[in-house]
Amino acid sequence: MATCPPYPTRAHRHTHWWQRSWVRYGALITLLALSGLVILALVREQTGTQGFLVGLGLAVLPVPLLIAAFRWLDRVDPGPWRNLLFCFAWGACAAALIAIVANSFATRWIATATADPAGADTLGATVIAPVVEESAKAAAVLLVFLFRRRDFTGIVDGVVVAGVTATGFAFTENILYLGTAFGTDQLTGDSGIASVTAATFFVRVVMSPFAHPLFTVLTGIGFGIAALSTGRHHLRRALLPLAGLLLAMAMHALWNGSAAFGEYGFFAVYAAFMVPAFGLLTWLVIWTRQRELGTVRAELPAYVLAGWLTPVEPYALGSMRARRIARQYARRHAGKEGARAVARYEACATSVAFLRQRGRRGRAGADFTARERALLETLWHLRGVARPALDYAARATAPPPVPVPVPWPVPPWVHPYGGTQGAYGLRTAPSPYGPQAPYAAQAPHNPYVPPYHPYAPPGPHRP
């Protein structure tokens, strides 16, 4: 007997050539490649070949650390690498090119209009540069928010996308500054710790590698909160990213203008604003990550009742330590393929939990059922490798059983009507424990504590 399809089919419509995915990808890659070539030529022209190579070698040092830090924050529900590659390339090529061209043009125009080159440089650094640079970096966050909406689900995603974009921008900017400093040292003959290159490296790479990521992360948080808003709050979804962008511009302007606050203005701004802001944002992101783990533990039990998951999996998937142990277990017993299968299982289970949460809040799309079914079928195909590893991880990370105080044995002189017989025939108060039920009746089934364990937690039958 024929059955109807679960969803109505749509008539085939002709797709224009500019709507095809390969055309869009090709155009984007071409744009970024051309921007990279132009920015390479501009930086090399300002620093020289030797200065460019020195700046490149020094500027690349903090990049792996920053990328690893943002990737660590995204371990609960990791996004695809293609998004991060796009963000880094946009920051290093397109945003840097926009900033160099726009800042130079605006500074020259102000200097010509006011006949004050020094004032134009100060105004360009404190006003023009923050507006132009943060807007150029925010464009990457906006593109991911609009065209990769499934991968942009909350604050952590906004922080990661914005942070990686700013890391790429800072990479190109550090090449320019370090290469220019090296050229200055070549002219003056300075070298070693007293050189301009060493001072620039210390300030930009050692003391403040997180400066640009910190500014742009504020924009990412605005987009992340907007992603959590329901479809009814259109004004909030529009104003929150704008508010984050304005905060990023304000902090960037404060950072660039710190040199105008006196000899120790830079250190004062660094200690009073940058370090506390960095600590506060780090706490916020880690707290949000813990909330995501709580979402996994709260949403997955529904799939345990439906038979898709085992009872211990919500606990194991809601703990980063248990996840790591499960992957290590799979690597030991099934090799790299097993570890990758467990990692994919963890990612799919997390996506199911977040999808279910969005569905309960009315923020899931029309394809909610199809996406949920596809993720669950992926879990079902990977269960043979993942379930033993997660079961082992759950047992390895289970908290130790809490000992329950066991009452003293009832002495033989217990009075039959309650209470005990004292040494001189006096009766004491009745025992608060009363008759004791067997341990099997006291404790419900616990996968980590045998039913007859003497330290099983008390059950509903215990008085």
Image: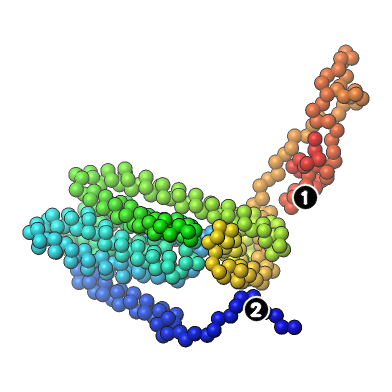
Position of the N terminus by quadrant: bottom right
Residue at figure coordinates x 82%, y 21% from the top left: 429
Residue at figure coordinates x 35%, y 66% from the top left: 139
Give the labeled residue for mark 1.
Answer: 445
Looking at the image, can residue 92 be seen? yes
The residue closer to the viewer here, 97 or 225, is 225
Q: Earlier in the sequence, mark 1 or mark 2?
A: 2
Looking at the image, can residue 55 be seen? no
Q: Which mark is residue 5?
A: 2
Task: Name the residue type under label 2.
Answer: Pro
Numbered disc 2: secondary structure: loop
The residue closer to the viewer here, 337 or 97, is 97
Q: Nearer the viewer, mark 1 or mark 2?
A: 2
How many discs appear?
A: 2
Q: Residue at the right extreme?
A: 416
Residue at figure coordinates x 9%, y 63% from the top left: 112
Task: Name the residue type under label 1.
Answer: His
Left or right of residue 247: residue 127: left
**Position in image of residue 288 (x %, y %):** 49, 52
Left or right of residue 159: residue 445: right
Numbered disc 1: secondary structure: loop
Left or right of residue 68: residue 195: left
Q: Which colouring convention does the figure follow?
A: rainbow
Position of the C terminus by quadrant: top right
